[in-house]
Amino acid sequence: MGVGIEVHGLNAWYGKNLALNSIDMSVPANHVTAVIGPSGCGKSTFVRCLNRMHETIPEAYAEGSVKVGEMDVYGSGSDPVEVRRRIGMVFQKPNPFPTMSIYGNVAAGLKLNGFRNRKQMDELVERSLRLAALWDEVKDNLHKKSGASLSGGQQQRLCIARALAVEPEVLLMDEPASALDPISTSKIEELIFQLKQHYTVVIVTHNMQQAARVAELTGFFLMGSLIEYDKTEKIFTTPADKRTEDYVTGRFG
Amino acid sequence: MSDSVKPMNSPEPLGQLPKPVTSMPSLAKVEAGHRAHTPSAVLAKIRTSHPRSSRVPDQIFGVIILLSAISVFAIVVLVVWELVSKSQLSLHQFGLKFFYGHDWDPVNGNFGAMPFIYGTLVSSLLALVLAVPLSVGVAVFITEMCPQSLRAIISFLVELLAAIPSVIYGLWAIFVLAPLLRVYVEPFLAKTLGWTGLFSGTPYGLGMLAAGIILAIMIVPIIASITREVLIAVPQNQREAVLALGATRWEMIRIGVLRNARIGIVGGIILGLGRALGETMAVTMVIGNTPQIAKSLFAPGYTMASVIANEFSEATGDLYLSALVEIGLALFLVTLVVNALARLLVWSITGGTARVRA
Amino acid sequence: MDQGATAFAILAAILVLVPLLAIFAYLVIKGIGSVNLAFLTQTPKPPGEAGGGMANAIVGTGLILAIASVFGVPLGIGSGIYLAEYGRNRFGDFIRFTADVLNGVPSIVIGIAVYSLIVVRQKHFSAFSGGVALGIMMIPTIARATEEMLLMVPNVVREAAYGLGIPKWRTTLSISLRTASAGVITGCMLAFARVAGETAPLLFTAFGNQFWNLKLNQPTAALSLQVFTYAISPYDEWHKQAWAGALILIVMIVGAVAAVRLTTRGSLKGA
Ligand SMILES: Nc1ncnc2c1ncn2[C@@H]1O[C@H](COP(=O)(O)OP(=O)(O)O)[C@@H](O)[C@H]1O
Ligand SMILES: [Mg+2]
């Protein structure tokens, strides 16, 4: 079951460069929320701040308040590794673990976090692969084939399954379909639609049609600020801000 | 963690933007019935199996890794320390005279290292004279002339040459190379070049010439592999620019390739020199082990590494041992300087990509 | 001129390969006749007597190399991990430089240092000190190979692991190092091959032994030492044995190098 996300006064830096400027945003549970905006406006930075991936980059840091359900992500006692365990992430380029089998990839998060029960693990792997709509394509080669041997679209769904296997409460996706062909893209979009029954999904996209297709809510970022955040339909038809209108009507970067 | 640190400079351009609309849009009221599902059992399990924060194991790991890195430094320090402290006796007794004294007389406690320094330098330079043209030739052959299908094989064979242990080179040199030199090569050299004085006297087979030849064979793979990497690093357009001027292939190699690569090649040569200076077993087995300074390359000699190998475990008396350690210290310092120089030259060409093996 | 240069390059290639072939040919021709059951199972006979073997030296080499690996492989891989995952800074450059210095130290000098550090304190030549000497020589090779291979692991793979909530130590060992494992193993095997035939650092550490020894704190025979001793001896019988010992040594080493070559041919692509 997903949980909501509350962001207050979030700032993020790369060294001395401010990449996010005082973001306030409230993401409801079990919905798909899209983050759009021109390249370099801070979309990736924003989602990476939600699970403290941002700080894995040398000299990068963030401050402000992010609450995911009950969890205070930047609270003083909070452990970034624990945070990432509870918030799944799918990256722009499919990045399966190259030396692991399909099964190994999906089970990696469980195994490497100390989960030992073999039978339960088998079930979780199957469930995750089914959720990611990949089960039927790979079930005969779970142990034989390596994750890297799949096609790009399959790899990305494998990465989704891998993220789902640890049963996160939130799923962050950073342009998950931008490196994929149209057929794979539509599969992923369908999948996102299914996933919101179980998870809260935040998806970054620079493709406005995609945001319109999959997301109930959309936030528009520009130069590190959240300009407008509303129902997707409203953002695309009657935006309140001139800059949003310029962007969605294509008069902008 | 760095996330709570405020930056010194405040953000200017972004500050002017108005506050965005952030209140929850209306459809966000989620039906409560949907939330019957309990929070993840898996996560709960993982959490109980990892009750502690990840920071402690991460820190322990970081410390272990740091310690193994420091161990590399510690080993070098220990080596230097042992060499310096164990050679004090000899250093004080003989001072600089140690290095130009000709007398190596353990019985009377008189130690001058000149014959060994001479033997090391002459055998290594001889090895360079023989190895450099061969290595550059092989490298040019591999990179510029060799058919694609042969390239990998020849590279592999040259690499294999580097994998043969020194003691096996020595064995081969004693029983194959030395007789060959004695019976054919040395008499021939004496006849044709004897007037130079470099090739005179009794052709023993074993001696400075044999040591130089065997060293040359051993350093060819080092110089050749560095030269090959340096040649590969020469941009293709340099080659094409020369060819476009109507140059022949050899002119192209000479002007477009070798000239551009010369600093790196010199680096490879110096690296080979570093290896030759410190090489022990093969030389010990063929050089004749006689502490003398002779002009003829047929005559036996002795090197710094060889005298350590032969006399260290039998050295009686602290001064004798200390003198041998001092030779070791000198050898260490010389190879250190030579290797550092070589690396600087090679890196300046390949930008640090060449795999330097010595 | 053009033809002359071409001819020279070809000649150089031939001249370089002739000794290689000659050495291998002699090893096989002269060595194979003396490799028999007695050679592989018996200890040396006194000088001049026929028969006997190098069984103790073969086992001794195995023992010394095992100690060397136990000592050198973890430290080498550990420092390689440091250089790749933590050492992108001044201190890392310093350690990198130090590893290069260590790599260039003549092996006989390593022998002197280990002699004063261990043998003098233990008051014994020993298999242990020989193993440490060879282990030290393995470290820089393994460290640089590990670093190089870890740097080839794309950062997105690490990010995937962090994104799953896998801690850094786990990510490094189970994801990055595992992804780089083929190359790291290659590095270890090359380091192993490089020290397997080393003789100089063993002269006054392991020292050699005509008899069986499996104790870590006692002088121990090694193939390379035995080949050396026999080669410079005046006895024909021992010369034969030297060739046989050398053949076994080279088979071990070339076997390791070739195995690395064959097994890693395609496997680096995944990284
Ligand atoms: N690793 C980094 N180091 C320094 N600056 C970065 C880094 N990644 C992104 N930035 C900067 O932060 C800003 C936001 O980048 P990003 O969040 O990746 O944008 P988006 O995902 O919207 O294209 C950009 O100006 C970019 O140049
Ligand atoms: Mg981005």
Image: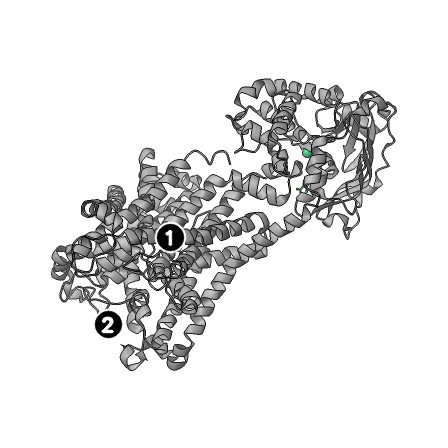
State whether residue A54 appears in this view.
no
Question: What chain is tagged by disc 2?
Answer: B
Q: Amino acid at mark 2?
A: Gln
Look at 54% across and 58% down and name the residue there: B70
Look at 60% across and 39% down and name the residue there: C158
- Find disc 2 in the rendering and name its residue: B292
Q: Which of B53/B325 is in front?
A: B53
Please, is residue A87 above or below residue C143 in the view?
A: above
- Judged from the image, the secondary structure of the residue bearing numbered disc 1 is helix
Q: Which of A140/B217 is in front?
A: A140
- Find disc 1 in the rendering and name its residue: C63
Q: Report which quarter residue A188 is drawn in.
A: top right
- Judged from the image, the secondary structure of the residue bearing numbered disc 2 is loop
Q: In the visual, does C140 lie left or right of B280?
A: right
Give the x, y percent position of residue C225: 29, 58
Query: Which circle, 2 or 1, is nearer the viewer?
Result: 1
Q: Amino acid at mark 1?
A: Leu
State whether residue A73 appears in this view.
yes
Give the x, y percent position of residue B83: 43, 69
Please, is residue A206 above or below residue C196 in the view?
A: above
Look at 64% across and 38% down and name the residue there: A113
Q: In the visual, does C52 lie left or right of C73?
A: left
Q: Report which quarter residue B293 is drawn in.
A: bottom left
Asked if the residues shown at circle 2 and circle 1 are in contact, with their CB atoms under 8 angstroms apart, the answer is no
Ligand 1 shows up in the quarter that is top right
Q: Residues within 10 Å of mark 2 (few under 14, many from 20)?
A: some
**Location of the N terminus of chain A (image quadrant):** top right
Q: Which of A242/B33 is in front?
A: B33
**Location of the C terminus of chain A (image quadrant):** top right
